Image (spheres, rainbow, N blue to C red):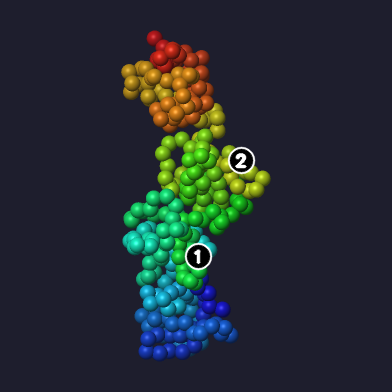
Amino acid sequence: MINLGELQVLKIKRFTSVGAFLNEEKPEDEDVLLPKSQVPKGAKVGDEIEVFIYRDSKDRIIATTKKPKVTIGELGHLTVVSSSKIGYFLDWGLEKDLFMPFSETVGHVEKGKTYLVGVYLDKSRRLAATMKIKDMLSTESPYKENDKTKGTIYSINRDIGAFVAVDDKYDGLIPKKELLGVYEVGDIVEVRVNKVLDDGKLDLSLRERGYIQMDKDIEVILEKLRSNGGRLGLNDKSSPEKVRNELQMSKSGFKRAIGRMYKEGIIDITEKGIKFRD
């Protein structure tokens, strides 16, 4: 069976002035055209050719020897090249760009930017792209607690956190409390696996393990103190929001760091904030 959106090996059945018509050994569908410009030199009837099946600009099913950047059911990073009244067009390596309806976008989409998308068949049996990829991600990852890897943020819920496609394959979440800094859909982040949940999904963190992260937090605070003349208007009573906005770290991480700095005689903690110890 000839399947839209897939790479397939088909046989040349016949030649015409416009190209070669291909099909399987035992045809279930009508022959599909491989345009003359893409027929390999010296090809003859009976030869097998690997082709990709899609629809051309006139909505006809057609074959191409070019390989797209992503095929049906797969995920890939594609760049937005243009837009229309009903959606966007993405460069996936073929003559006809891949369409992504507005209804399949997540967050703000801009021309020239690259996003992680999946390819699917819409209700009209046309190939299309979607940024709503959650159902295309696996929960059977090879990762265990404290493993480090990379992923792409595919959705953000300000009340829950950032959803991440780990290795662009596996489903994970950076919880709200771990989401320090400003992030957008499409950002590639380095993460640490905090926990593998019972359903196989990954609980992620942007931070190192506690003792390593504390050292990094202390360096951030020291740099901030140096740039502010040795003083900083934050202490253990400051709000989590104020700490986050000022230092891009959690309130708990800040408290651990300044506690250690105080014990080591680096700073004093006052009602107005912290300062280098004289």
Q: How many marks?
A: 2
**Does residue 230 lie above or below 86 as drawn?**
above
Please state which amino acid type lies under the numbered disc 2. Answer: Lys
Q: Residue furthest top?
A: 278
Q: Residue at x 65, y 48 (%)?
A: 199
Give how far across and how far down residue 119 sits, in percent. 48, 63
Which of the two residues, 266 or 122, is positioned nearer the viewer here? 122
- Per the image, the residue denoted by label 1 is 120
Q: Nearer the viewer, mark 2 or mark 1?
A: 1
Please state which amino acid type lies under the numbered disc 1. Answer: Tyr
Which element is circle 2 on? strand
First-in-chain label (2 vs 1): 1
Q: Residue at x 53, y 78 (%)?
A: 2
Which of the two residues, 241 or 256, is positioned nearer the viewer here? 241
The answer, for residue 216, to whether it is visible in the render is no
Say which quadrant the N terminus sits in: bottom right
Give how far across and how far down residue 70 sits, in percent. 46, 63
The answer, for residue 172, to whether it is visible in the render is yes
Give how far across and how far down residue 254 sits, in percent. 48, 24
**Does residue 35 lie above or below 190 as drawn?**
below
Q: Residue at x 41, y 30 (%)?
A: 245
- Per the image, the residue denoted by label 2 is 195
Cα gap from disc 2 to disc 1, whole angstroms: 31 Å
Say which quadrant the C terminus sits in: top left
Which element is circle 1 on? strand
Q: Residue at x 40, y 90 (%)?
A: 16
**Does residue 234 lie above or below 136 as drawn?**
above
